[in-house]
Amino acid sequence: MQERLDQTSTESGLMPNLDEDGLPIHVTIAQLWVLLFEQLAALCTDTRPDVRRSACQTFFLTLNTHGPNVELTAFEQVRDQGCFA
């Protein structure tokens, strides 16, 4: 996940600004939602049936529960990256 955060900051032209705990301070909530959905979507295709089932359940429960709070741009990013394909 840290690699993805670094890649996101590189793509946007931002150098990673870290707080005193070493966490990036420039990451938006929308970017965190995208990372979360990407990771869950990747687990939905895992070869282990239990992992795959749990990841899909979590993915859709999270989407159903928190979807109204997620910015449209985050959904568009996830869609464009093929997570809903």
Image (tube, grey):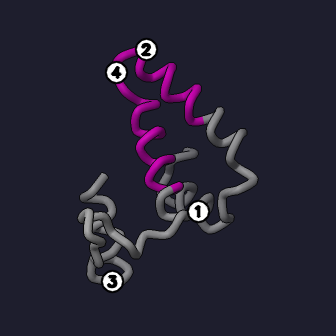
The numbered mark, 4 or 3, whose residue comes first in the sequence reads: 3
Which residue is label 4 attached to?
47
Mark 1 packing: few (<14 Cα in 10 Å), some, or many (20+)?
some
Which disc is residue 50 wearing? 2
Question: For numbered disc 2, what is the local secondary structure?
Answer: helix
Q: Image point 29% across, 68% down: which residue?
A: 7
Q: Residue furthest bottom?
A: 13
Disc 3 is placed on an element classified as: loop
Mark 3 and 2 residues: CB-CB less than 8 Å, in contact?
no
Question: Does 59 sit above or below residue 15?
Answer: above
**Left or right side of 65 for 51:** left
The answer to whether residue 51 is magenta is: yes
Instruction: Please identify the residue farthest to the right as the structure is shown.
Output: 68
Pointer 3: what residue? 14
Disc 4 to disc 3, C-alpha distance: 36 Å
Callout 4: helix, strand or loop? loop
Is residue 4 toward the left or the right of residue 29 in the image? left
- Mark before the other along the chain sequence, 1 or 2: 2
Disc 3 packing (10 Å; few <14; some 14–19; many ≥20):
few
Report the span colored magenta: 33-59
Going by the numbered disc 2, the residue's amino acid type is Asp
Amino acid marked by disc 1: Ala
Residue 42, image x and y in percent? Answer: 40, 39
Q: Quadrant of residue 22?
A: bottom left
**Residue appearing at x 65%, y 33% in the figure:** 61
Indicate which disc residue 74 carries. 1
Give yes or no for contact between labels 1 and 4 (Cβ–Cβ under 8 Å): no
